């Protein structure tokens, strides 16, 4: 997972958490989005996304030789 992908995931997680804790989003939708935000943070910390692995994707920059 590339650093840009990690930063975007963390920013999305922060926005979702802020919306949840200020009661802009609530209920089941809020809990689901908060869980997804937690997954985004976790995948950013470990630099691995299982969905990317399943589909053979990568957001790491390719070194040109």
Image: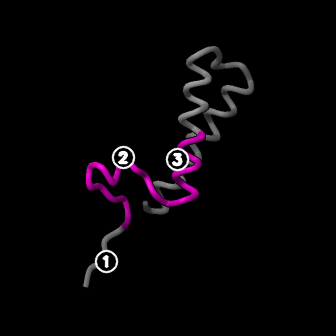
Which colour scheme appears in the figure? Answer: one colour
User: Would you place residue 23 above or below residue 35 in this image?
Assistant: above
Q: Is residue 54 magenta?
A: yes
Secondary structure at numbered mark 1: loop
Mark 3, residue position = 9
> Which percent across, then down, holds residue 21?
73, 27
> Which percent across, then down, holds residue 15?
62, 36
User: Would you place residue 42 above or below residue 60 in this image?
Assistant: above
Q: Is residue 47 magenta?
A: yes
Mark 3 / mark 1, whichever is N-terminal: 3
Residue 51 is marked as: 2
Q: Nearer the viewer, mark 2 or mark 1?
A: 2
Classify 10 Å Cα crowding around label 2: few (below 14), some (14-19), many (20 and above).
Answer: few
Q: Left or right: 49 with respect to 55?
A: right
What residue is shown at x 56% (from left), y 28% (from top)?
A: 33
Residue 32, quarter of the rendered image: top right
Mark 1, residue position = 63
What residue is shown at x 45% (from left), y 57% (from top)?
A: 48
> Which percent across, then down, holds residue 11?
58, 45
Question: What is the CA distance from the residue labelled 2 to the residue labelled 3?
Answer: 14 Å
Q: Quadrant of the C terminus?
A: bottom left
Which one is nearer the viewer's eye here, 50 or 25? 50
Q: Which residues are magenta?
A: 38-60
Q: Left or right: 39 with respect to 25?
A: left
Secondary structure at numbered mark 2: helix
Residue 53, quarter of the rendered image: bottom left
Mark 2 / mark 3, whichever is N-terminal: 3
Question: Which SS does the magenta portion mostly show?
Answer: helix
């Amino acid at each position: 997972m590339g650093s840009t992908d990690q930063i975007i995931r963390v920013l999305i997680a922060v926005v979702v958490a802020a919306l949840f804790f200020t009661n802009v989003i609530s209920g089941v939708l809020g809990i689901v989005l908060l869980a997804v935000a937690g997954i985004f943070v976790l995948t950013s910390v470990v630099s691995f996304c299982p969905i990317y692995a399943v589909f053979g994707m990568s957001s790491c920059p390719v070194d040109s030789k």
